[in-house]
Amino acid sequence: MSSTLDFTRKPVVLIVDDTPENLTLMNGLLKEEYRTKIANGGKRALATAALDPVPDLVLLDIMMPDMDGYEVCRRLKADPRTAHVPVIFLTAKTEVEDEQRGFDAGAVDYITKPISPPIVMARVKTQLALKAAADFLKDKNAYLEGEVARRTHEVQVIQDVTIMAMASLAETRDNETGNHIRRTQNYVRALAAKLQSHPRFGAELGSDTVEMLYKSAPLHDIGKVGIPDAILLKPGKLTPEEFEIMKTHTTLGRDAIVAAENLIDAPSTFLRLAREIAHFHQEKWDGSGYPEGLAGEAIPLSARLMAVADVYDALISRRVYKPPFPRDKAVGIIREGRGKHFDPDMVDAFLEIEAEFHAIAERFADSEEDVKAKARA
């Protein structure tokens, strides 16, 4: 909780009046119970109120020569530091219109002169009690909001770590290194961010969705945990029968995420995107992909994004069955896949930000040690 509240100190009351006798009277009345500050004019009152400690209450005369009390009150309420400080007008002005003008300026009470000391003390005590309660609730709410934010962040971190751990589990059984996860999720985010301004995609690609795509992309190959090593790690070309088994990693991944979805009470956009990516990232724009042979916009947007990212990374990366392709050759293959393997507009966007893809690849490049460690594993 913040240090705003200090129950060991006396509340601070600022007394404002241009008449010395009135200042002496009010100061003598209040100083035993409260810490008092005095100001003999409006401008001095504003300057004093701005000094620490900020007053807990202001007793304010109205008729003053340099700046009247109404204007002082309005300025106090306009300043964020003093806006919450209650103001009680102490004045000889007794007309209803005067009182209304005082309340309109932001005052909480209006006491007419000559004062009754018991009434002044009672009203001061009441307003300070109300302010103390308001300050307590304000601090309590700030504490609770901070605690909620802290715990939400903690849960988010745990979720992110869990996702990466699950994705890494699949990667440990494959020929790819963990940097493949980081590269592809960053490719997906970069491509999705580029497409936010495109009329076909803007409505679907809000900032929150782009971030969830980034976080769900690492689960695209989670289904590979169910593929036998003899097929998953085979250095040569797969037989047609082996390839049919390999293709099931898409449905295995989908089933794993569906099982997770069934454990929660409400739909999860994150899990939906993860499921779409795992299930459909091997589909092709022309309908020649798998597992369902979807074509065009029947393929979920998330999976179309993942397809570009996954293929690009496969092309530029070393595998046991191939060396990494040069940058220009990889870009050329993606370009050739426009309208065949990939959504044409996504290829166009990719070509515009290819330098960003290259920068991501450089940032998360596999070192020789990464490759050797993977080979040893």
Image (spheres, grey):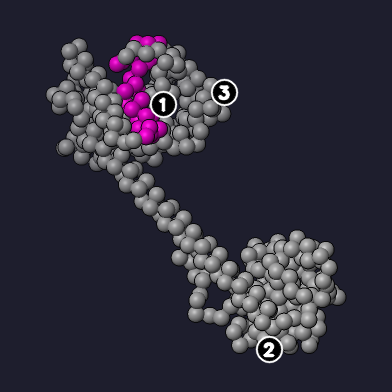
In the rendered image, which residue does mark 3 sit on? Answer: 199
Disc 1 is placed on an element classified as helix
Q: Which residue is mark 2?
A: 28
Q: Secondary structure at mark 2?
A: helix
Which is nearer the eye, 26 or 158? 26
- Between marks 2 and 3 in the image, the one whose residue lies nearer the viewer: 2
94 drawn magenta? no
Q: Which residue is mark 1?
A: 302
Secondary element type, mark 3:
loop
Q: How many marks?
A: 3
Q: Is residue 194 above or below residue 363?
A: above
- Quick one: quadrant of the C terminus? top left
Q: Residues within 10 Å of mark 3 (few under 14, many from 20)?
A: few
* Front label number (1 vs 2): 2
Amino acid type at mark 2: Gly
Viewer-proximal residue among 327 and 291: 291
* On screen, residue 95 above or below 18: above
Dot 1 crowding, Cα within 10 Å, few <14, some 14–19, many 20+: many
Residue 126 horizontal side relative to residue 376, left or right: right
Q: Residue at 50%, 27% (x, y): give it.
A: 204
Front in this rendered view, residue 97 or 201:
97
Which mark is first along the chain, 3 or 2?
Answer: 2
Q: Which residues lie in the magenta part? A: 266-291
Q: The disc labelled 1 sits on which kind of residue?
A: Ser
Q: Where residue 100 sits: x, y (%)?
A: 78, 62
* Depicted 89 relative to depicted 161: above or below: below
Residue at 65% x, 80% y: name it.
121
